[in-house]
Amino acid sequence: MAAVPAPETLATRALAVLAKNRRGAWTRPASTLYPHLWSWDSAFVAIGLAPHDAERGLAELEACMAAQWEDGMVPHVRYAPDPDGAYFPQAEYWRPPEDLAPPGIATSGITQPPVHAMAARRLHDAGVAVSPELFHRLVRWHRYLLGPRDPEASGGVTILHPWESGTDNSPRWDGPLLGYALTRRPEYRRVDQGQVQDAGERPRDEDYDRYLDLVLRLREHGYRPERLPDDYPFRVKDVLITSVLAAANRDLIALAEALGHRRERELLADLQERILRGFRRLFRVEVPGRLGHWYVDRDMRTGAPLGGLSCAGACAVLVGLDEAELPEPEAWLAGALDGPFAASGRSHRLLPSVAPGEPGFDPVRYWRGPVWINIQWLLARGLGPASPLAGALRAEGLRLVEAAGFREYYHPETGAGLGAEDFSWTAALALDWMDA
Ligand code: 9WN
């Protein structure tokens, strides 16, 4: 008699997703929609792999960091030489300058949130050796973000393209993105819309025109922030990236201590102080109601705060703000979760990418309302392992994944799965949660 197959556990299925999406040393975010290496996706994958296959996690992070440019930037995409699917923009579109891009590796020319040092520390804790080369790449990465990306020495990271934020079509970007006159219509053919159930889950064509116009402008100036003309239209201090950098930099300081890099430890501690000094001034806004205050991005062209209640501001719990600024992060975040971010009739208690009452909220369109697992993971991480709310986010996140599969994002009311299926970071972060 044939043996009855054992029921697949969630962990087994998550590992199977990562195995399916694997391409040699690294992992695609999803098999057809995203056939290359994406920077923060790979860092999340490395975190999820740490307790299961730390060597592979390390190889993933190394493959991502090997795409680093001479100036320290880590590009948001490292292109596969033989992609098994179509993606636009393809490698040829970027044309990175030869003196900046690494030889023999095709990359984009913009960056993404710096989760990488969190992954490095996780891997170190799992017992694999973080090489001096990898450590120094991470130091150069953080120095780039608070160097050429912070010419004002404000302690906040400037992004030059919405794709850099990792939250591409968030309504946070509508003002600067749609507010400038488009003088050309870049020629291109999208391939993403046919790869999801409903094209309404992806960004609009009007957004894409501008994404590509900005790429062409950056390309014309060799992707060097200091060479961009004053009228470059998209220059924003990003609250999510700066918050992630604060947490990642703390991990890099811990690694510097563990690995005995004393000089770098001092240098990183200076960067940390700079973030902490600047954060409130750059990002804090007062909001009506019980919440009291929130954190939003800042438009560096006008100096004005941008956008409203989005998941990016919630990531302030990662920063390590002092008692005077954020005395009770847990109560503050719970107030948001059960207040303005509570979607009507919701089937779960998770934070949507945008608060439902905000202009621009759309429950199915990508970063304009759906729930993303990496955001819940970052929030739980910011609250710390002892936090009951972090435990609740973890449990709710796992319940959602169990019910709807490892999707790219989820409906903020019904919890239905949206976007790509078998999405790598959802699988990886569920694994990390199951290990907690
Ligand atoms: C553009 C891969 C990436 C994620 C981003 C997400 C989405 C790309 C796209 O997919 O962006 O970089 O084509 O929409 O917004 O966070 O890294 O998963």
Image (spheres, grey):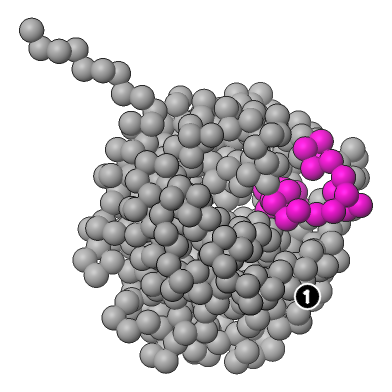
Residue 211, image x and y in percent?
52, 70
Residue 400, image x and y in percent?
51, 29
Amino acid type, mark 1: Ser
State the residue in front, 23 or 383: 383
Inspect this view and state whether residue 345 appears: yes
Side of 281 relative to 274 (left or right): right
In reply to whether residue 328 is colored magenta, the answer given is: yes
Start and end of the magenta stretch? 308-332
Report the residue marked by disc 1.
154
Residue under the image location 28 percent in, 44 percent down: 19
Inspect this view and state whether residue 41 appears: no
State the residue in front, 57 or 267: 267
Residue 238, quarter of picture: bottom right
In the image, farthest residue toward the left: 1
In the image, farthest residue toward the top: 1
Q: Is residue 333 above or below residue 63?
A: above
Residue 266, image x and y in percent?
69, 73
Residue under the image location 90 percent in, 40 percent down: 289
State the residue in front, 325 or 75: 325
Residue under the image location 60 percent in, 85 percent down: 225
Residue 105, image x and y in percent?
32, 77
